[in-house]
Amino acid sequence: MQIKYLSACIIFCLAIILFFSVTPPVQASVCRNFQGHQICIISIKRSAKNYWEYRAIVSVDGVKRPLEVYNCRDQNKLEADGKIVPFDDIDPGRLICRYFQNKR
């Protein structure tokens, strides 16, 4: 009878230890003030084939944008609808290219 309770207690303790040892992934983002706007890089992935291209989801002043491909070599972006647009003055692409140019 005591062995049943002992094994149940050990299993319970192991479950508690396992529960507290696993940490959920943290969603970290890089936020910068850029020309009067807060631009946050929510997720970013560099192209393996074209190292000057970044696929990124960003938010500008708290408004999340869809996935866009930023081309740092030609200074343009491929929008979600397939249009290629040059960077604006306050475009997140300028921040992405400036921030990651020294990270290579």
Image (cartoon, rainbow, N blue to C red):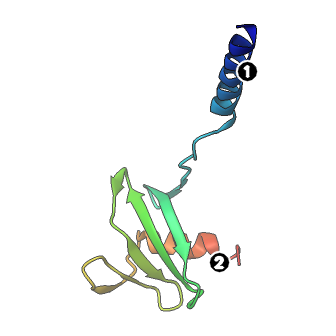
For label 2, the residue is 101
Q: Nearer the viewer, mark 2 or mark 1?
A: 1
Mark number displayed over residue 85: none
For image coordinates 53% across by 49% down, the residue present is: 27
Please name the amino acid that badge 1 sits on.
Answer: Ile
Residue found farthest to the left:
81
Per the model, the C-alpha gap separating discs 2 and 1 is 53 Å
Upstream in sequence: badge 2 or badge 1: 1
Q: Nearer the viewer, residue 10 or 20?
A: 10
Q: Position of residue 33 (x, y in %)?
A: 51, 55
Which quarter of the picture shows residue 21?
A: top right
Q: Position of residue 40 (x, y in %)?
A: 48, 56
Above or below: residue 62 compared with residue 43 = above
Q: Of helix, strand and loop, which one carries label 2?
A: loop
Q: Of helix, strand and loop, which one carries label 1?
A: helix
Above or below: residue 52 compared with residue 80 = below
Q: Nearer the viewer, residue 37 or 17?
A: 17
Q: Could you tell me which quadrant the C terminus lies in?
A: bottom right
Mark number displayed over residue 10: 1
For image coordinates 49% across by 60% down, the residue present is: 41
- Neighbour tally class for label 2: few under 14, some 14-19, many 20 plus, Cα within 10 Å: few
- Neighbour tally class for label 1: few under 14, some 14-19, many 20 plus, Cα within 10 Å: few
Q: Nearer the viewer, residue 35 or 28?
A: 28
Q: Could you tell me which quadrant the N terminus lies in?
A: top right
Query: Would residue 4 appear left or right of 26 to someone viewing this image?
Result: right
Please name the amino acid that badge 2 sits on.
Answer: Gln
